[in-house]
């Protein structure tokens, strides 16, 4: 499949009387976004702010960051999520806006230890791509009796509708760059590299909620699925659960897929993408890993494969199993993982024990700690909100830790800071032994 992404770079993001792009500034009329909320019965109010790089601002309860994008031609925006109809994403022309993001905050207490946060200034902001551009922060407020499943999916719809709105108003302006991603032609004389992309782990399913991630459908027990790389860049996979070191923005700009596409036909042959989910049962893990390796060999004819994970220990075990089975079939496998314990060492903490998996990339450690200073402005929650690190939170309405006042000095972890660590490498950090 062939996808062209036109990118327009904006200079600033501001509120205005009309949602438009003028003189390089993207203006947002709050009323246009509030109109989206009017169609969502589970929201009582919608709080909308803009935060700028360098501001003494902390954004909490973050579940996602989205890039403004819309279809220009070829198919529809967010099929299966914003529409009842389906089209296969990944073809035609897409407009992307560079220089601003949309931050979605889930301001309720359900399993809130899974929400992320980030500061717009300070130590963490210096290495956070999201803190380096203006962010439109959307915080819907729901009544106490709102179903958390409805809340999550409504928040996702508002975020994606806002993404489409902000991109569409730029269509009258010429794009700064245009890039076509195309791996329709295969190059058998070049080394063939595939990508095994683990997108979901049902170890985080709660109250039997299955996150509808693929064209708006749940995939908790799926067997390996072949998907076109351009589908993933163009809205086939969409998040609506808690923050798990991955955002929609990262998927829209998936660094592994983008870089493999750019090298396709030059020094490698990008064979394609295999989608998997985490197996929490050993029997399922064995089947998935063997099926994945067989597809890599017999369908993709891969010489090598990059394997990334979702989140958690079970996810790492699955990545190791897929890599090991691929190696047994003569396919060089390179897992990309994160380390759980920053006080240990890579040899102990990588959780991949298969002896034939000897090339591992580490993109960070979950529990490296930061002490963050007080801030002047708090977004994403009430002014008296508590800051819940990755080790505490609220489950089923019961506090398991109280946390610290979120506007004050807080201790945070690498995993908690949205933008610092990415399951797919869209970050600046890595774990090293020293």
Image: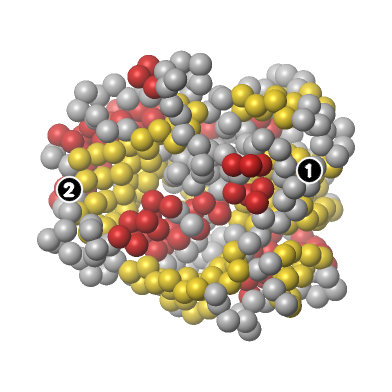
Residue 348 x/y as whole percent: 37, 16
Compared with 307, 186 (above or below) is below
Choose mark 1 or mark 2, whichever is in front.
1
Locate the N terminus by quadrant.
bottom left
Say whether residue 309 is left or right of residue 150: left
Residue 283 x/y as whole percent: 29, 28
Alpha carbon distance from label 1 to label 2:
47 Å
Q: Residues within 10 Å of mark 1 (few under 14, many from 20)?
A: many
Q: Residues within 10 Å of mark 2 (few under 14, many from 20)?
A: many
Count of marks, rendered view: 2
Does the rendering let one see residue 273?
yes
Q: Quadrant of residue 362?
A: top left
222 or 10: which is nearer to us? Answer: 10
Residue 181 x/y as whole percent: 37, 68
**Can you tell which mark lies on residue 57?**
1
Tell which circle, 1 or 2, labels the residue nearer the N-terminal end: 1
Say whether residue 213 is left or right of residue 379: left
Say whether residue 195 is left or right of residue 21: left
**Can you tell which mark lies on residue 29?**
none
Residue at the image position 43 percent from the left and 71 percent from the top: 179
Say whether residue 6 is left or right of residue 307: right
Compared with 167, 412 (above or below) is above
Which residue in the rendered view is the most extreme toward the bottom?
172
Residue at the image position 42 percent from the left and 22 percent from the top: 433
Compared with 390, 43 (above or below) is below
- For label 1, the SS is strand
Q: Quadrant of residue 335?
A: top left
Residue 313 x/y as whole percent: 43, 26
**Can you tell which mark lies on residue 303?**
2
């Amino acid at each position: 499949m062939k996808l062209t992404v036109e990118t327009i770079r904006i200079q600033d993001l501001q509120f205005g009387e009309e949602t438009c792009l003028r003189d390089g500034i993207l203006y947002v009329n709050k009323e246009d976004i509030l109109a989206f909320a009017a169609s969502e019965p589970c929201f009582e109010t919608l709080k909308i702010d803009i935060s700028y790089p360098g501001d003494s601002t902390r954004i909490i309860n973050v579940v996602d960051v989205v890039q403004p994008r819309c279809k220009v031609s070829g198919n529809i925006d967010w099929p299966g999520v914003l529409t009842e109809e389906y089209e296969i994403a990944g073809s035609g022309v897409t407009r992307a806006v560079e220089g601003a993001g949309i931050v979605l905050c889930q301001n309720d207490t359900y399993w809130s230890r899974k929400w992320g946060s980030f500061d717009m200034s300070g130590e963490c902001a210096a290495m956070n791509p999201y803190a380096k551009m203006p962010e439109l922060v959307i915080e819907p407020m729901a009544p106490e009796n709102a179903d958390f499943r409805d809340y999550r999916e409504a928040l996702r719809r508002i975020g994606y509708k806002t993404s489409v709105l902000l991109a569409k108003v730029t269509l009258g302006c010429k794009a700064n760059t245009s890039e076509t991603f195309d791996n329709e032609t295969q190059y058998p004389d070049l080394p063939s590299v595939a990508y095994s992309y683990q997108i979901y782990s049902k170890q985080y399913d709660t109250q039997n909620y299955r996150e509808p991630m693929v064209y708006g459908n749940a995939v908790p027990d799926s067997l390996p699925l072949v998907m076109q790389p351009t589908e993933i860049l163009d809205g086939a996979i969409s998040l609506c659960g808690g923050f798990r070191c991955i955002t929609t923005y990262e998927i829209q700009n998936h660094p592994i897929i983008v870089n493999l596409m750019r090298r396709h036909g030059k020094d490698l042959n990008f064979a394609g993408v295999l989608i998997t989910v985490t197996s929490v049962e050993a029997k399922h893990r064995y089947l998935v890993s063997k099926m994945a390796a067989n597809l890599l060999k017999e369908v993709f004819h891969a010489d090598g494969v990059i394997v990334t994970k979702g989140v958690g220990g079970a996810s790492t075990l699955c990545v190791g199993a897929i890599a090991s089975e691929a190696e047994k079939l003569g396919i060089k496998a390179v897992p990309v993982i994160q380390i759980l314990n920053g006080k240990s060492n890579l040899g102990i903490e990588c959780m991949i024990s298969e002896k034939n998996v000897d090339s591992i990339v580490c993109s960070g450690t979950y529990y490296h700690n930061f002490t963050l200073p007080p801030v002047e402005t708090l977004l994403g929650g009430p002014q008296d909100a508590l800051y819940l690190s990755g080790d505490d939170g609220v489950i089923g309405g019961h506090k398991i830790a109280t946390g610290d006042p979120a506007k004050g000095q807080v201790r945070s972890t690498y995993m908690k800071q949205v933008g610092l660590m990415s399951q797919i490498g869209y970050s600046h950090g890595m774990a090293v032994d020293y």
